Image (cartoon, rainbow, N blue to C red):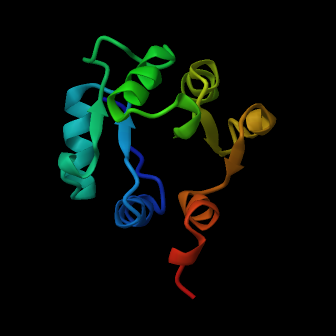
Amino acid sequence: MARLTIQKGYPEIIEQLRLANKKVALVTRNSQKAMDKFFEETATEPGLFDVVFSRSFPLVKPNPAILQHIAELWKLSPNDILMVGDSYSNDIVCANEAGCLSCLLMNEKNRQYASKCDLAVDSLNQLQAKLLPTTQKH
């Protein structure tokens, strides 16, 4: 199994989104075993997310139907959903084709795709500052 990398700012942004009564989904191409490891290493309860879809679900990124399915579950328009990810080919393409907003979590390997999404950030902390500016600690 590949090394699991937890993004800096992960627990804070999830906590603040939940406090702001925002719906949160976890959509991944990882296996259930990798997801179990993620939940264990982050001390996150799966119930913190409104929905969790791994590669065992019939719809998998970059198929845009996965995000359209979430929009239907939540009774939202796809353009009311923001997909955040670090993979252009899996996350950003999926969001763009589904009609969702897209946010690239940039790194040294994907920075060239910043212009292909609605928002590009260097960290989840930066995204939190943009989405939830009043929750930032001073």
The residue that appears at 23% across and 55% down in the rendered structure is 44
Q: Quadrant of the C terminus?
A: bottom right
**How many numbered marks appear?**
0
19 is higher (above) or lower (below) than 117? below
20 shown above or below 97? below
| Residue 3 at least partly seen | no
Answer with the quarter of the image where residue 53 lies.
top left
| Viewer-closest of 17 and 8 | 17
Query: In the picture shown, does residue 138 fall above or below 102?
Result: below
Residue visible at 55% across and 63% down? 128
Residue 111 in the image, given as x and y percentages of width and height: 74, 40
Which of the 4 image quadrants contains residue 11? bottom left
Whether residue 73 sits left or right of residue 120 in the image: it is left
Can you say which quadrant of the picture contains the N terminus? top left
Percent across and percent down for residue 68 are 46, 21
Residue at x-position 36% and y-position 67%: 19
Q: Taking the image as drawn, is residue 35 in sight?
A: yes
Q: Is residue 133 above or below residue 116?
A: below
